[in-house]
Image: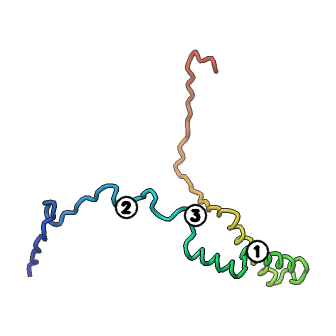
Amino acid sequence: MAKESRPPGRPRKDGKPAGSVPKKPKGQLGGAREGAGRPKGSKNIFSRDSVKKLEELDFDPIEKLVELYYRIQDDLMNGNVRAGSGAYAQLLATQNQIMNSLMSYGYRKVPERQEVEIENKKPLAVKLNLKKGNKDG
């Protein structure tokens, strides 16, 4: 059974053959445009609503984290929890998580570095040519 050929379609308005793709005009589509997009530092709707709700409830998450950190510190130092026990280890881990959470408010995350091994090391040669008659050297 032979395949039937389809008609080429309607010719384009610019007189070129049907099926050819017109070129996109430069500067109209895609790419960055001045003034486009969301302003830097603006908060999205969900963030604003969340902050508003926390203010209504008089709840400061950073303050609560600091309070919890010191409460754990007191329990660990006063001997309320036996050193070496599972509860002691869990409190230390929780304290560490609190510190990491609080660090994000004051410091940027440190990017992890990857060491790259270079197998083909080539020697570096530096030649210094001083001009004759130069009184500086």
Relative to 79, 60 lies left or right: left
Residue 40 lies, in percent from the top left, at 55, 62
Amino acid type, mark 2: Gly
* Residue 97 in the image, given as x and y percentages of width and height: 72, 75
Farthest residue, direction front: 56
SS of the residue at dot 1? helix
Q: Specify the quadrant that holds the C terminus.
A: top right
Q: Residue at x 62, y 61 (%)?
A: 111
Measure the alpha-carbon separation of dots 3 and 2: 23 Å
In the picture, the disc for residue 30 is 2
Looking at the rendered image, the disc whose residue lies closer to the viewer, 3 or 2, is 3
Closer to the N terminus: mark 3 or mark 2?
2
Name the front one of labels 1 and 3: 3
Label whose residue precedes the other's in the sequence (1 or 3): 3
Which is more N-terminal, label 1 or label 2? 2
* Residue 99 in the image, given as x and y percentages of width and height: 74, 71
Give the SS element for disc 2.
Answer: loop
Dot label at residue 41:
3
Residue 71 appears in which quarter of the rendering? bottom right
Question: In the picture provided, is 46 more to the left or to the right than 104?
Answer: left
Q: CA distance from mark 1 to mark 3?
A: 24 Å
In the rendered image, the vertical position of residue 34 relative to residue 123, given as above or below = below
Residue at mark 1: 63
Name the residue type under label 3.
Gly
At mark 3, the secondary structure is: loop
Residue at (11, 74) in percent of width and height: 6
Which amino acid type is shown beneath numbered disc 1? Glu
Which color scheme is applied? rainbow
The image quadrant where one finds the N terminus is: bottom left
Badge 3 vs badge 2, beta-carbon distance below 8 Å: no
Check if mark 1's residue and mark 3's residue have beta carbons within 8 Å.
Answer: no
Answer few, some or many: residues within 10 Å of disc 2's Cα (few below 14, many 20 plus, some between 14 and 19). Answer: few
